[in-house]
Image (tube, helix red, strand yellow):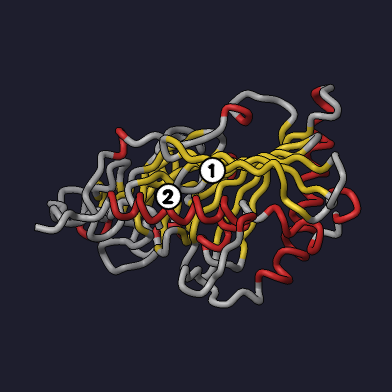
Amino acid sequence: MIPNQWYPVAEARKLKGKPMGLERLGRKIVLWRDGRNGTGSVRAALDRCPHRGAAPSRGKVIDGEIQCPWHGFRFGSDGVCTRMPCEGSEARIPRGMALAMLPAREAHGLLWVFHQGADCVPADPNAVPIHWFDEFADGRTGAAGSSFDWPFNYVRTLESNFDVHHFPFIHGGGRISGERVEFFEVSEANNHIRMRGQLRHEHKDKGLSFRVEYKPPAVSLLEFPGFAFVVADCPIDASNTWRYARYRQSVIRIPGIAKVLSWFALQLDFRLFQNRQDEWIMATQQPAQPDQAVDHLVGADAGTAAFTNLRHRLIREASPKPG
């Protein structure tokens, strides 16, 4: 993972009046809202009560405070314990009785957690932006979103966003798009990768145009004639990834109908293309985690190569300097 970055961990609409326990970034995390009746700002902590190690995510939220289900210990929005029922209301609360809090934000319909990373140069979460794309900014209509868990390594999952030239073979689009990648351009500036080109038949003038963009650590934009979608990926652990996608079709722009068509496009991609066709072949990749010494990239893989180089550079920049 790239350290010192914001990672999307869940859909904001799903966090209401109860705690949400999930595994992200290789850790068990609990999310809750610090207001009453499911309102307020999102809070995040490691899903471990400091008292006896139980999961607060199985408890409840009372007046914006999260209560552990085992002994009723309660913790405020800053993670500090505010109540120990077994010791009485006058008891002195030990200084270390607090949850391990994580920086959290809500933006673009998603909940985000800041990943500091071990053995890296510390960064101020408030100084690090959450990356997104203007085409899918808050308030835009006609888009539909959903999420699912994907049984693949996070880096392999991100690589797949640049792999446009598998479409004719895995998804059966060869008659429409052709197999050859042409008019191909890949650039990187300000940690933002842009890739565009066409899939064409040999010796034919027209093809299927595409555009792919990536902003670290987790957000990609893919655009084809008639529709586009933004994908936000977060590692669950070393072998699994949480994936959120938001689709928007541009063929019909009547608000209600546009959103319905976007929803159908989303379901088609998730249930057919990704959950069946892509999983079928990606499950055979060896090794399961990318290895530059093993994978032999070609010219059409320039987007994947740019992503790999950017990822390694950002990891190096966050690492302590020798001496």
Mark 1 falls on what kind of element?
strand
The picture places residue 104, in percent across and down from the top left corner, at 39, 42
- The reply to whether dot 1 and dot 2 touch (C-beta < 8 Å) is yes
Number of residues whose C-alpha sits closer than 10 Å to that of mark 2, classed few (under 14), some (14–19) or many (20 or more): some
In the rendered image, the residue lying farthest to the front is 203
Q: Which residue is drawn at 86% across and 27% down?
A: 252
Could you say which is closer to the camera, residue 232 or residue 224?
224
Query: What is the C-alpha distance between the residues marked 1 and 2?
Result: 10 Å
Q: In which quarter of the image is residue 194?
A: top right
Residue on which the image places disc 2:
310
Q: How crowded is mark 1: few (under 14 residues within 10 Å), some or many (20 or more)?
A: many
304 lies left or right of 51 = right
**Above or below — where is 309 with respect to 185?**
below
Task: Indicate which disc, 1 or 2, sits on the residue closer to the N terminus.
Answer: 1
Is 48 above or below relative to 8?
A: below
Q: Give the x, y percent position of residue 308.
A: 47, 56
Q: Which amino acid does label 1 sit on?
A: Tyr
* Depth order, front residue of 226/143: 226
Mark toward the viewer: 1 or 2: 2
**Residue flagged by tag 2: what amino acid is it?**
Leu
Where's residue 149, x and y in %? 61, 60
Residue depicted at x 81% and y 58%: 168
In which quadrant will I find the C terminus? bottom left
Q: Name the residue under label 1.
A: 214
Residue situated in front as seen by the camera: 191 or 76: 191
Residue 178's mark?
A: none
